[in-house]
């Protein structure tokens, strides 16, 4: 069973029996390790792949969660900024504001109490109506435009062109702005 090359080296006296046995043992160890290694490596590789996939999925979930948190924080900061703009720039209304001004917001008719001068400014478009915490406040046009840039749902401006439905039979009959309901 020996290697014929090893036998020739032994006969020539170039190697000893101990060296041949040691080389044979090393060869056997190496073969045994190679036979066992593929089984272990497959198990290890599968475990590594599963762990790597789980880590990637977790990282993806974490990125999505961070993105949501950032968006929520940004929306909250914008809302706080809009509230400060409205509170700092709203026109003060007192008991002299006894005229009811009706307007449409979110397809519902809302009302706000103003005086005659404020009503004329709203009609001209130099004042806008902003929503803050469920109530409506009057703000100058430039502030209303800033608020509208940040969040369109928080502002009502009257100087924008309204679209007229072509099939509307009353399109040629304009309703006056100073009409009191």
Image: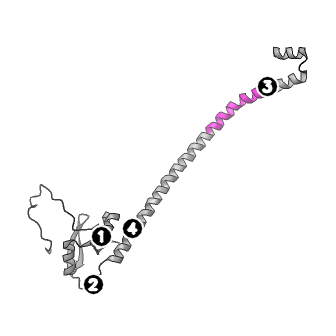
Q: CA distance from mark 1 to mark 3?
A: 86 Å
Pick the quarter of the image with the N terminus. top right
Q: CA distance from mark 1 to mark 2?
A: 21 Å
Label at residue 94: 2
Asked which secondary structure carries label 1, the reply is: helix
Q: State the image coordinates of residue 40 (x, y, percent, origin top left).
A: 68, 34
Residue at the spot x=28%, y=74% of the render?
140
Residue 1 seen by the camera: no
Residue at the spot x=63%, y=37% of the render?
45
Mark closer to the observer (1, 2):
1
Which residue matches tag 4? 79
Magenta stretch in the rendered image:
28-46
Is residue 139 in the magenta section? no
| Label 4 CA crowd tier, 10 Å (few <14, some 14–19, many 20+) | some
Q: State the image coordinates of residue 17 (x, y, percent, origin top left).
A: 90, 21
| Label 3 CA crowd tier, 10 Å (few <14, some 14–19, many 20+) | few
Which residue matches tag 1? 144
Which residue matches tag 3? 27
Mark closer to the observer (4, 1):
1
Q: Earlier in the sequence, mark 2 or mark 3?
A: 3
Outermost residue on the bottom side: it is: 95
CB within 8 Å, label 4 to label 1: no
The picture quadrant where one finds residue 35 is top right
CB within 8 Å, label 2 to label 4: no
Q: Earlier in the sequence, mark 1 or mark 3?
A: 3
CB within 8 Å, label 1 to label 3: no
Pick the quarter of the image with the C terminus. bottom left
Which is the main secondary structure of the residues drawn in magenta? Answer: helix
CB within 8 Å, label 1 to label 2: no
């Amino acid at each position: 069973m020996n290697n014929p090359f090893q036998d020739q080296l032994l006969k020539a006296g170039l190697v000893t029996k101990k060296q041949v046995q040691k080389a044979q043992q090393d060869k056997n160890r190496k073969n045994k390790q190679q036979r066992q290694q593929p089984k272990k490596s497959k198990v290890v590789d599968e475990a590594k792949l599963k762990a790597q996939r789980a880590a990637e999925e977790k990282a993806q979930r974490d990125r999505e969660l961070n993105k949501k948190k950032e968006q929520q924080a940004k929306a909250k900061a914008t809302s706080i900024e809009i509230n400060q703009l409205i509170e700092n720039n709203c026109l003060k209304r007192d008991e002299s504001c006894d005229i009811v001004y009706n307007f449409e917001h979110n397809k519902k008719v809302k009302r706000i109490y103003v005086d005659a001068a404020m009503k004329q400014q709203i009609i001209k478009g130099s004042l806008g109506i902003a929503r803050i915490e469920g109530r409506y406040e009057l703000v100058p046009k430039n502030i209303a435009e800033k608020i509208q840039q940040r969040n369109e749902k928080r502002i009502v401006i009257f100087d924008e062109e309204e679209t007229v439905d072509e099939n509307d039979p009353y399109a040629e009959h304009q309703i006056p702005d100073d009409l009191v309901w």
